């Protein structure tokens, strides 16, 4: 067992990047403010000093060009890790993402690879309003050709980053701002975890049961996992034992893992900070019910962001975001209905 | 620098291949589409963007390139693919949607990918530009030889990707060349109605790179005018923007009634068709004889007929093969 140390997600991401860059000269990082500044969210801190400007590239504010450049570099043998500062900015560069990055392997009939990572910050909770607070998990997961991961803690963050960099297919790596361990965005202490110093991969497409329980399966990703864990502690006092599943990956989606849990509990609650309709929560519920709807003792439930732009004002945003309290209330109701 | 005799014959031969290939595609495309034109019918379904008239832009540039050089092409890719050395049999099979095609029928005529000669396309306007910049960056970072060429149409110069990519290529001093094939029409909208400058090459100044305008749709002129830019890119001198005034002899795609063209334009373009013009030039300068020309034509026809036979006789993919190669 190698030595471990306590890291934030930001530092875990940077550590994975540094180790992969040491191991493979074709790995490089580019994006806005990722060099001198070390990334607005701290996940490239220290890289410029060790690897220099050639491999740690500040870009102009030209997402179409530099994400497109990532595609071309990846197809030519490099392993670019490209930062899209806020996932909300995908609007200006989605052609490069979903029409090129995600489709070029297919268009080449498998003759080309696109070993590229896009890392983007997600999530609200700090009054950044409608253009800097979205999750958009479902948007990326919906479109074929991209793997999509979203870690909830530093251990997963490092292992998923390493796996993403080594993957020969494009990976969208979505990190939640509220979990980065940057004080100015609030800090979720449980996202800071012991991380092995040695590098390791976490298999993309594998969910993890973080708390075992008999009564309700709560499926979540990113910050929702932490809300669920807190709810689980409270619910235990009322003798409600929930099982919490951290998806960690949306594409591929670990449907088997979810189904086997629901088989045991008979109840399903999805917690997702992304928008309510046409998204991740609907997909998970459909995956379970189309497998076998007799497994369910109660109708499946979901706690999601309502179908509105994310409001600025504290009371409105806090009301709209999934919370521990919502989860507790919903779980209690689910146990009441027999 | 002028092309050598053998380079001129190479250019002519590739123009012939592209032209004959498209003439045959044009005929085959209509199989099953008469009397009612339905794009999904016939051995070649889907949209079909012919490049006849634009062959000089392909051969004049590709005459300077090797297999290691990278090209990102457009939705109108045949002439460039031919000149870059994309495998003709596999290309034709791809256009037919066959299992033996470049990507086993997953891409079709607008998405031709041949990693053996570093050729790819994007059906989305200007979206080959970023990848070309990235491929050039890759060569620079790996200290590997080879340059990237991004082909676009003149309509693409009004896309954000154009401006972002030029700036990025310039600020990073990358070995990439942007070739604008100006055929004067973005589907039905004339360049003059869509573009604030007469010459897009003037826009190079805004990105601190050389801009070259080539007004002759002639392989020799294009060869000579692009040589310096290509040498500069190979020698670390950075990117160049080149605009070539060319002509689209067909419609935007097959089935286009071309009602937007001013009267007489099409006739004029056909009269200036660069292929017979170049043939005449090579004959009159004694670069080739009539007999040599005849055997070049026959050889071309054999190559294309062989590719068509290959495509026709190849199997369609099993439907379930659609599920393969989403990921590497």
Image: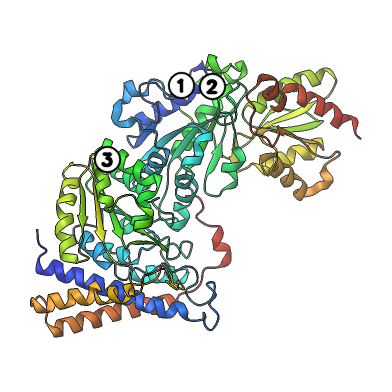
Q: In this view, does B189 lie above or below B266?
A: above
Mark 2 residue element: loop
Nearest-to-viewer mark from 2 and 3: 3
- The answer to the question of whether label 1 and label 2 lie on touching residues, with beta carbons closer than 8 A, is yes
Q: Which residue is painted at 76% across and 50% down in the image?
A: A290
Mark 1 residue element: loop
Calculate the distance from the C-alpha at mark 3 to the C-alpha at mark 1: 34 Å
Where residue A150 appears, as percent x and y from the top left, is 57, 33
**Residue A249 as seen in the image, left or right of residue B100:** right
In the rendered image, which residue does mark 3 sit on? B206
Where residue B91 appears, as percent x and y from the top left, is 38, 68
Q: Is residue B152 above or below residue A333?
A: below
Q: Which residue is painted at 35% across and 52% down in the image?
A: B195
| A286, B289: nearer the viewer | B289
Q: In this view, does B139 lie above or below A322?
A: below
Q: Which residue is painted at 34% across and 43% down in the image?
A: B163
Quadrant of res B213: bottom left
**Label 1: chain?**
A
- Of the image marks 1 and 2, the number of the one nearer the N terminus: 1
**Residue A293 as seen in the image, left or right of residue B12:** right
Calculate the distance from the C-alpha at mark 2 to the C-alpha at mark 3: 39 Å
* Callouts 1 and 2 on one subunit: yes
Quadrant of res B226: bottom left
**Label 3: chain?**
B
In the rendered image, which residue does mark 1 sit on? A42
Mark 3 residue element: helix
In the rendered image, which residue does mark 2 sit on? A180
Where residue B229 appears, as percent x and y from the top left, is 18, 50
Q: Is residue A13 above or below residue A100?
A: above
Q: Which residue is painted at 38% across and 54% down in the image?
A: B194
């Amino acid at each position: 067992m190698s030595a471990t140390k306590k890291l934030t997600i930001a530092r875990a991401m940077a550590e994975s990047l540094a180790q992969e860059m040491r191991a493979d000269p074709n790995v490089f990082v580019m994006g806005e403010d990722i060099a001198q500044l070390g990334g607005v969210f701290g996940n490239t801190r220290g890289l410029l000093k060790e690897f220099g400007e050639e491999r740690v590239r500040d870009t102009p504010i030209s997402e179409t060009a530099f994400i497109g450049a990532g595609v071309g570099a990846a197809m030519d043998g490099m392993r670019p890790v490209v930062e899209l500062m806020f996932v909300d900015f995908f609007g200006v560069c989605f052609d490069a993402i979903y029409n090129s990055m995600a489709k070029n392997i297919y268009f080449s009939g498998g003759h080309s690879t696109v070993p590229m990572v896009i890392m983007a910050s997600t999530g609200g909770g700090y009054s950044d309003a409608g253009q800097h607070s979205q999750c958009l998990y479902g948007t990326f997961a919906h479109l074929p050709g991209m793997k999509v991961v979203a870690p909830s803690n530093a251990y997963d963050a490092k292992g998923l980053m390493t796996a993403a960099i080594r993957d020969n297919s494009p990976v969208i790596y979505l990190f939640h701002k509220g979990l980065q361990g940057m004080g100015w965005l609030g800090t979720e202490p449980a996202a800071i975890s012991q991380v092995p110093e040695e590098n390791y991969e976490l298999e993309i497409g594998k969910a993890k049961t973080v708390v075992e329980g008999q009564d309700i399966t709560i499926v979540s990703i990113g910050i929702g996992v932490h809300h669920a864990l807190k709810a689980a502690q409270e619910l235990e006092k009322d003798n409600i034992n929930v099982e919490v599943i951290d998806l960690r990956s949306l594409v591929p989606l670990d449907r088997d893992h979810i189904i086997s849990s629901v088989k045991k509990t008979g109840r399903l609650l999805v917690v997702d900070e992304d928008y309510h309709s046409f998204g991740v929560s609907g997909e998970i519920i459909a995956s379970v019910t189309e497998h076998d709807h007799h497994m369910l003792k109660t109708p499946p439930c979901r706690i999601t962001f309502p179908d509105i732009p994310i409001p600025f004002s504290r009371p409105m945003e806090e009301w709209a975001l999934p919370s521990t309290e919502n989860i507790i209330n919903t779980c209690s109701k689910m146990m009441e209905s027999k | 620098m002028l092309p050598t005799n053998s380079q001129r014959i190479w250019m002519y031969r590739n123009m012939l291949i592209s032209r004959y290939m498209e003439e045959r595609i044009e005929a085959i495309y209509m199989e099953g589409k008469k009397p009612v034109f339905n794009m999904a019918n016939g051995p070649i379904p889907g949209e079909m963007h012919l490049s006849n008239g634009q062959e000089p832009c392909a051969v004049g540039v590709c005459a300077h390139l090797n297999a290691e050089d990278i090209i990102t092409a457009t939705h109108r890719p045949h002439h460039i693919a031919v000149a870059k050395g994309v495998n003709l049999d596999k290309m034709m099979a791809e256009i037919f949607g066959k299992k033996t095609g470049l990507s086993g029928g997953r891409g079709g005529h607008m998405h031709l990918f041949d990693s053996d000669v570093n050729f790819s396309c994007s059906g989305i306007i200007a979206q080959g530009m970023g990848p070309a910049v990235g491929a050039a960056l890759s060569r620079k970072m790996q200290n590997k030889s080879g340059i990237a060429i991004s082909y676009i149409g003149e309509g693409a110069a009004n896309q954000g990707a154009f401006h972002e990519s030029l700036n990025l290529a310039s600020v990073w001093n990358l070995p990439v060349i942007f070739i604008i094939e100006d055929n004067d029409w973005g589907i039905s909208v004339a360049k003059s109605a869509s573009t604030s400058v007469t010459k897009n090459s003037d826009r190079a100044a805004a990105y601190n790179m050389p801009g070259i305008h080539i007004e002759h749709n002639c392989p020799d002129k294009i060869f000579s005018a692009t040589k310096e830019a290509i040498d500069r890119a190979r020698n670390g001198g950075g990117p160049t923007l080149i605009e070539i005034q060319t002509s689209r002899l067909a419609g935007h795609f097959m089935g286009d009634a071309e009602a937007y063209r001013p009267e007489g334009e099409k006739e004029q373009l056909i009269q200036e068709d660069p292929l017979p013009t170049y043939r005449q030039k090579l004959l009159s300068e004694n670069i080739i004889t009539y007999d040599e020309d005849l055997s070049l034509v026959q050889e071309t026809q054999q190559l294309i007929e062989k590719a068509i036979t290959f495509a026709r006789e190849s199997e369609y993919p099993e439907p379930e093969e659609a599920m393969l190669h989403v990921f590497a």
